[in-house]
Amino acid sequence: MLEAYLNILVVFAIMLVGYVLTWRKWFDNHIADVFSKLVLNIALPLNMFLNMTERFTKEEFLGLAKGILLPTVSIVITYLISIAYAKLTKVPAGRIGAFKTMFTASNTIFMGLPVNIAVFGEKAVPYALLYYICNTTFFFTLGIYLIQNDNLERAHIRESFDLRFLLKKLLSPALLGFFVGLCWMLLEIPLATPLRDFSRYLSQLTTPLSLFVIGIIIFQTGIKNLKLDKDTLGVLLGRYVISPLVIIGLSKFIEVPTLMLNVFILQSAMPVQNSMPILAKGYGADEGFATSGLVYSIISYLFVIIILLKVIY
């Protein structure tokens, strides 16, 4: 429990550094744009690549593949619920894509992996990464597509939805890094030390730069302007109620080992992806809404984790 709380406090601490340095005029919107480009096009793709090549072996991946059905189906159902919820509550244009993405996808690596290790130990890692694969595939394909469609400046532009256009929209640099890492791992290609070190150094920029950008956005937005409106509350409902309940309900029909199920429950009920504001900023979506969703999901997680642990145990 203590380790889970410390991981959350680390997130706040790094965001606070970004906030203070913006207040001190070290950072500005130009720096935020540069950091965003570095994360989206270099650091994050390499992070995806390393997660697949270093955390999995071919045998482990193939042995766990049969457990992929539960998280896959749960994410699809949660996404469908997000569509219905967005229509029912009339989420406004310009944030519908971000809403659906935050409602459905969770922070499975930066928050999820350390929390699961703190709760269950190293034996939880393979199951946590299994959920990560499903979550990441959704987030960096359909999620990115939805966020891009929130750009109201491009909403009036008629574009041809041919195969090349669709692939360009879906195959983000991060997803390409993920797929390259997956193929690399399945083909059992040795990872040369210089390539591993190069990738590791740059991939380690992902979290601090992302959180710095969030700190910059919070300062530029103003803490008083972080809104806990009905749409943000809807995101929290999706993250902490709907998503884990879908996992629990499906487990009655798709049987998995108890530890795997408990890890899936924790992974499904994690805060919003910490890269949401940076993606919203990069693709011209509602970055204020994305930032509010992330910040409030992290704050509320301090209380949610207590309830989750009681459910599991």
Image (cartoon, grey):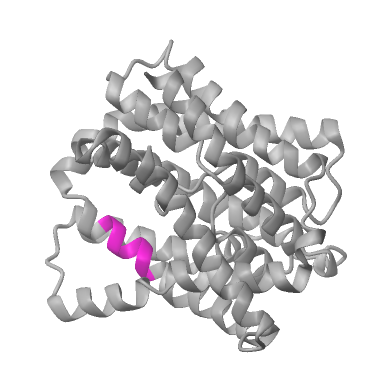
Residue 73 x/y as whole percent: 48, 28
Quarter assignment of residue 51: bottom left
Residue ID at (39%, 51%): 109
Quarter assignment of residue 255: top left
Residue 71 x/y as whole percent: 43, 32
Quarter assignment of residue 54: bottom left
Vertical position of residue 276 compared to residue 81: above or below = below
SS assignment for the magenta stretch, majority: helix
Left or right: residue 212 versus residue 131 is right
Left or right: residue 270 versus residue 78 is left
Residue ID at (82%, 44%): 229
| Nearest to the observer: residue 221 or residue 144 | 221
**Segment colored magenta:** 46-52
- Residue 297 sits inside the magenta stretch: no
Work out which residue is located at the far front of the displayed protein and give it: 2
| Nearest to the observer: residue 202 or residue 41 | 202
Residue 279 x/y as whole percent: 61, 65
